[in-house]
Amino acid sequence: MMKKILMAGSIIGAAVLFTGCGIKTSEYNVSADNVQTLRDYKELKLDVSTFTATTPAESSIMCRLAETVSTPKGESFEEYIKDALISELKMAGSYDKNSDLKISGNLNKIYGSTMFGNAYWEINVTITSSNGKSITVNTKRDYPSSYLATTACNNMGTSFSPTIKQLIGDVINHKDFSSLLNK
C-alpha cells in the first residue's frame, strides 16, 4: 500500500514539475523606427495579402520541454507577422486595402533557442510583391539566457515581439525592398 502511495506521489510530483501553464508572447506594438522608414517612401500605398508558412499554423514553440511559448491569441506565427506588418504600414499611413500593389510572405523558418549562453530567436521570411520580385530576410536576435528554465522561457516569450520588430525592420531596410514597390 505504501509503495502505491509513493508511486502515485512521484507521478503527481513529476507531472507538476514538468507541466507548465504556457507563456504567451506580448501583443505587437509598432516601432517608431519602422514607421519612420516606411514614411520615407513617399506616396507608398500597399496592401498585404496572404502569409503562408513552410510549417503552417504553428502558434507555439516548446521551451526546454517544460513550457510552451505561444502567440497572444493563439494565432499562427505567420499571421502574427502579417498583422504586425499591417500595423506598421497603417501607422505610417502606407496601408491601403484596395491598392493594386500587394505584398505577401512566407515564413520559411522560425526557431527559438533557450540554451544557457546562447538564447536567440531566428526567423527567415520571403516577401513577394505582386510585381513578381521577392526578397528573403533572415533575422537572428539574441536575448538574455538563464540557467533556470522558468526564467529562460519567460525571456523567450518577452523577446518575441521585439524580434518581430527587428524582422520587419530588416525587411523594410533590405537593399532590394524598394524593388518590391515598383508597379
Image (cartoon, helix red, strand yellow):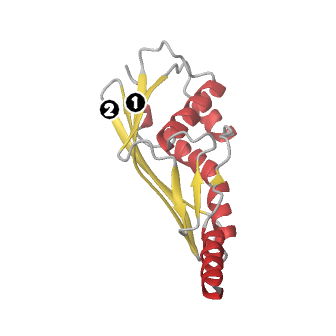
Q: Are marks 1 and 2 in contact (CB under 8 Å)?
A: yes
- The quadrant of the rendering that contains the C terminus is top left
Residue 134: image quadrant is top left
**The quadrant where residue 10 appears:** bottom right
Q: Residue furthest front?
A: 1
Question: Which of the two labelled residues, at mark 1 and mark 2, occupies the earlier sequence position?
Answer: 2
Note whether 138 is above or below 49 in the view shown: below
> In this view of the protein, which residue sits in the foreground, 18 or 139?
18
Query: Image height check: is 22 above or below 46?
Result: below
Q: Is residue 132 left or right of residue 73?
A: left
Up-down: is 173 above or below 117? Answer: above
Which residue is at a point 50% across and 36% down the rendered structure image? 79
| Rendering quarter of residue 12 | bottom right
- Residue found at the far left of this picture: 132
Numbered mark located on residue 133 in the image: 2
Q: Position of residue 170 (x, y in %)?
A: 51, 46
Disc 1: which residue: 180
Which three-letter amino acid code belongs to the residue tagged 2?
Answer: Lys
Residue 137's x, y, as percent? 42, 48
Q: Residue furthest top?
A: 98
Local SS, label 1:
helix
Q: In the image, is 170 to the left or to the right of 56? A: right
Dot 2, crowdedness within 10 Å: few (<14), some or many (≥20)? Answer: some
What is the secondary structure assignment of the residue under circle 2? loop
- Please name the residue shown 60% across and 52% down the image: 160
* Alpha carbons under labels 1 and 2: distance apart: 6 Å
Residue in view at x 61 percent, y 70 percent: 15
Q: Amino acid at mark 1?
A: Leu
Q: Position of residue 42 (x, y in %)?
A: 56, 22
